[in-house]
Image (cartoon, rainbow, N blue to C red):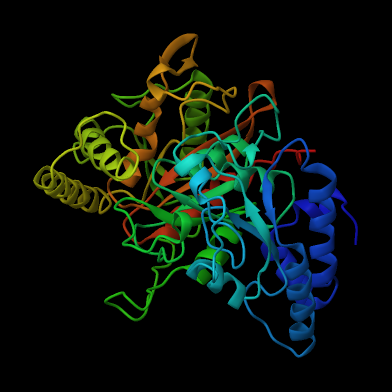
Amino acid sequence: MSTHPDLARTTATQLVAGLRKKSVSAVELAEASIARIEALDGQINAVIVRDFKRALADARAADEAIARGETRPLLGVPMTVKESYDLRDHPTTWGVEAHREHRAHQDALSVQRLKQAGAVVLGKTNVPPVLADWQSDNPIYGRTNNPYDLTRSPGGSSGGAAAALAMGFSALELGSDIGGSIRIPAAFCGVFGHKSTWNLIPQGGHSPGGYVGAGPPLGVLGPLARSAEDLDLALGVLAGPDADAWANKLALAPPRRDRLGGFRVFVIDNHPAAGVDGEIRHLLDDVADHLTREGATVARTSSLLPDLSASWRTYQSILHTVTTRRAPTGREPITAHELLDRFDDQFRIRRQWADFFRHFDVVLAPAFGTTAFPHTAEPDWRKRSLIIDGEETRYGDQLAWAGIATVANLPATAVPMGLGKGGLPLSLQVIGPHLEDRTTIAFAGLIARDTPPPKLAE
């Protein structure tokens, strides 16, 4: 086995097939991933916690299991997970100095599920402090760079995750998302990422410094990968209730359709709160035209579409309450009664989307208003800006694109659509009905089918 780029680009699904046919071994795959990380991660700084010794032992165990005829979903596949997940014997800092000395006593529930499915976890990938930025830079592990341009962000907060996939360091990743933290890094690094339906994947062991508490409103877990098929494979392992849930099993609906023809697609190319670059608008137009040629129904206006301005206000209010709970910003928090009112607003928004998705199958929208932006050292979001079509715009307004799905607890899949100006990845997001995660993943795979994957970052 070598660090040949073809092997580094191979999808998790393809690796599973090769492992089962014994055309490659789990140890060979683990060794190849480790060699690639050691050779190429110096400039990227994506895999910041390395568990190579245990990974090699797990890979040997996987090969033994395969020899016995076992066929677990991810048996022998090398992967990494976001730093925010507990990995036994390693810190879970969330990029915060106060948690530097913390050591997890056990793996997070999601990590346990992945390992039970046979995944070989190589280590953990970088994040911003408190997972609260679209960059991935913190005082403990330093800054992660975008594989396609080292002067630019890989996104955040799952920035190390997306960069690791783009570099071919791992075949699969586990991230989290409350403000686009899966979708935006996936978009910036040219990989697939799935924000799951809220509460579909339990959050046990995804907290800073071993804190035990209820999972936050809006926040979800989900996979990143190099193919839509891999997202579906990982989702099947990760999704399902935990011991504290009211249900004891889950049956996800299959995709609504298996070909582009027949899909009812709604396109959102503008938002009252956030801009979008012309390059991404043109991409949306091109994809919409392709869909029409393939027999899909494409619409851009509907009286059923929930009010995006009202949804944005509701999302902002709940998100601010969640993210400032233990990190005051000087802005007065809302009262408990006001928060309950926002939950009522959220419930009405969810009902509106349920009605909308009786008439449409998916929504196609920007994942972010620009491609990967240059690193910035300015800590205050209110003092940051982004250039869109030559105009300076407010940085934080881009939360609006992530918030469309997040405030309504809907699934959304970021899908890579090749490279644009300056060789930077282009991407869109596919939003779908509540608990119909497999529809957004399948549609993402279909629209990306004829788009060559970005050249492997080196």
The residue located at (59%, 22%) in the rendering is: 374
Residue nearest the observer in this picture, 87 or 121: 87
The residue located at (67%, 58%) in the rendering is: 123
Image-quadrant location for residue 76: bottom right
Coordinates of residue 353 in the picture (x, y in percent): 24, 48
**Callout count:** 0
Residue 167 vs residue 100: left or right? Answer: right
Residue 327 vs residue 83: left or right? Answer: left
Residue 86 vs residue 132: left or right? Answer: right
Residue nearest the observer in this picture, 244 or 118: 244
The residue located at (22%, 51%) in the rendering is: 350
Extreme-right residue of the structure: 2
Coordinates of residue 319 in the picture (x, y in percent): 30, 41
162 over 145 or under it: above or below:
below
In the rendered image, is residue 16 in sight? yes
The residue located at (57%, 48%) in the rendering is: 192
Coordinates of residue 312 in the picture (x, y in percent): 26, 34
Q: Quadrant of the C terminus?
A: top right
In the rendered image, is residue 96 in sight? no
Image-quadrant location for residue 306: top left
Coordinates of residue 226 in the picture (x, y in percent): 65, 51
Q: Quadrant of the N terminus?
A: bottom right
400 over 158 or under it: above or below:
above
Residue nearest the observer in this picture, 38 or 424: 38
Extreme-bottom residue of the structure: 68
Residue nearest the observer in this picture, 192 or 63: 63
